Amino acid sequence: MMTAPYEQYADSRDVWVFAEIQDHERVLEGALELLTRGRELADALGSRLIALVFALDAEQYLPAIERHGPDAILCCSHPALKHYDSQIVPDMFADLIAERRPSIVLFPSTEAGCDLAPRLAQRFATGLTSHCTDLSIMDHPDYGPGLLVMKRPAYSGNAIATVICPHARPQMATVQQGVFERRERDDVATDIEMLPFSYDLTKLRIESLEAPLRWDKPKVPLEQAPVVVTGGRGLATKKNFERLFELAELLGGEVGATRVPVFNRWCGEERMIGQTGKTIRPRLYLGFGISGQIQHTASIVDSEIIVSVNTNAGAPIAALSDYVVTDDAGVFLAKLIERLRSEKRG
Ligand SMILES: Cc1cc2nc3c(=O)[nH]c(=O)nc-3n(C[C@H](O)[C@H](O)[C@H](O)COP(=O)(O)OP(=O)(O)OC[C@H]3O[C@@H](n4cnc5c(N)ncnc54)[C@H](O)[C@@H]3O)c2cc1C
């Protein structure tokens, strides 16, 4: 009798999340969000949620991870893991997958996640869906129960692709920060398993001496900022763009950007909002000189109030905006800063 393809994976049920550490300082917000959704997926499958952390002094991150509901944490702590290393971590991760056979492995869509996930997908000859915007579980008449359903934008954001991976395991996805909500819970008992560090460091072809903290890191992650003032091409110069920081400070917010200022090196890529950047839902989004292409606006639509400033009253962003200002972005920005300053003084 022929075996249905999925039956080979009947023993492969757990959901794993790469609990990435950011700037050797904290657990990445996106990893905690993935744990929250991972918990729901594991519950739907009747399986276990496992978090994996590889870091220097990794024990310090365990309480934050535990609060997000994994059944177990696999933790490896070693000085060689101070920075994500694209030789050590994929090798260690691959050994664990080969030994323990998870059904699903999820990664944040970060530099590290987007380095690690494809390396693993290649080693296990399995599929990887990047930058997913939704994950759920379905039973399929041909491919069996418990399949991961991955949704992601396609055709420059003009369509949503629904992807499954019926013939290989693990099923793998990367997800951008801000896509899922993060929730703490206290109803799951978490086992901690400390893994020995047995990697042969003499195998390394490249040695990471230091990874700089990112120079332009927002003080508050953009996904959590109540106000995001965002600049686009219409601001025209780096000097104009930098005035956004003054406005953000006055409003108690953060600075975001479309892809254009990032490419022009007016700011770092951690400020990019959109399909290949962050997804935000602030109380107030203020957009200066932004046209409103779908790759940007898909990630701002959940903002409570959207205000746009553009010389072209018919720019697509106007249709999304609660308030539209038809003016030169640099001039209006300067006037607004001046007005807020004088109100503060008064
Ligand atoms: C696969 C893919 C992924 C992408 N991912 C992202 C992403 O994650 N984030 C992102 O932002 N983009 C992304 N893009 C790019 C995106 O398609 C747009 O090109 C980009 O968002 C446009 O940025 P913008 O609005 O700053 O510039 P433009 O589209 O060039 O718009 C500039 C606007 O400024 C206005 N303007 C001009 N002069 C002035 C002035 N003096 N004062 C006021 N307004 C003025 C113009 O009327 C215009 O509306 C992606 C594209 C692709 C193909």
Image (tube, rainbow, N blue to C red):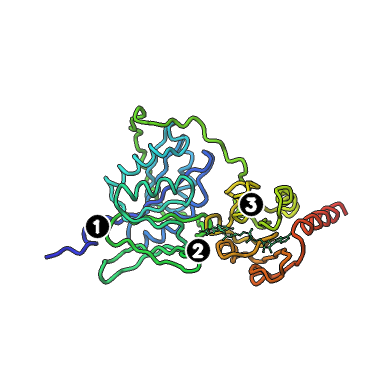
The answer to whether the residue bearing label 2 lies less than 8 angstroms from the nearest atom of ligand 1 is: yes
Q: Which residue is mark 2?
A: 156
Distance between the Cα atoms at labels 2 and 1? 34 Å
Dot 1 falls on a residue whose secondary structure is: helix
Label 3 CB less than 8 angstroms from ligand 1: yes
Q: Nearer the viewer, mark 2 or mark 1?
A: 2
How crowded pointer 2 is (Cα within 10 Å; few <14, some 14-19, many 20+) is rated as few
Total labels: the figure holds 3
Residue at horizontal 58 percent and vertical 41 percent from the top: 214
Mark with earlier residue (2, 1): 1
Q: Which mark is residue 44?
A: none
Q: Residue furthest left?
A: 1
Graded by Cα atoms within 10 Å as few (under 14), some (14 to 19) or many (20 or more), the crowding at tag 3 reads many
> Which quarter is ligand 1 in?
bottom right
Q: Quadrant of residue 88?
A: top left
What amino acid type should be assigned to the residue bearing mark 1? Tyr
Tell me the quarter of the picture where residue 140 sits. bottom left
Say if 210 sits above or below 32 in the image: above
Q: Residue at x 31, y 55 (%)?
A: 103
* Left or right placement of residue 174 versus residue 320 in this view: left
Q: Is residue 211 above or below residue 17?
A: above
Is residue 187 left or right of 22 when viewed as pictured? left
Q: Amino acid at mark 3?
A: Pro
Mark 2–mark 3 distance (CA, rounded to whole Å): 19 Å
Numbered circle sitting on residue 9: 1
Q: Using the image as rendered, state which of residue 288 and residue 173 is in the foreground.
A: 288
What residue is disc 3 on? Answer: 261
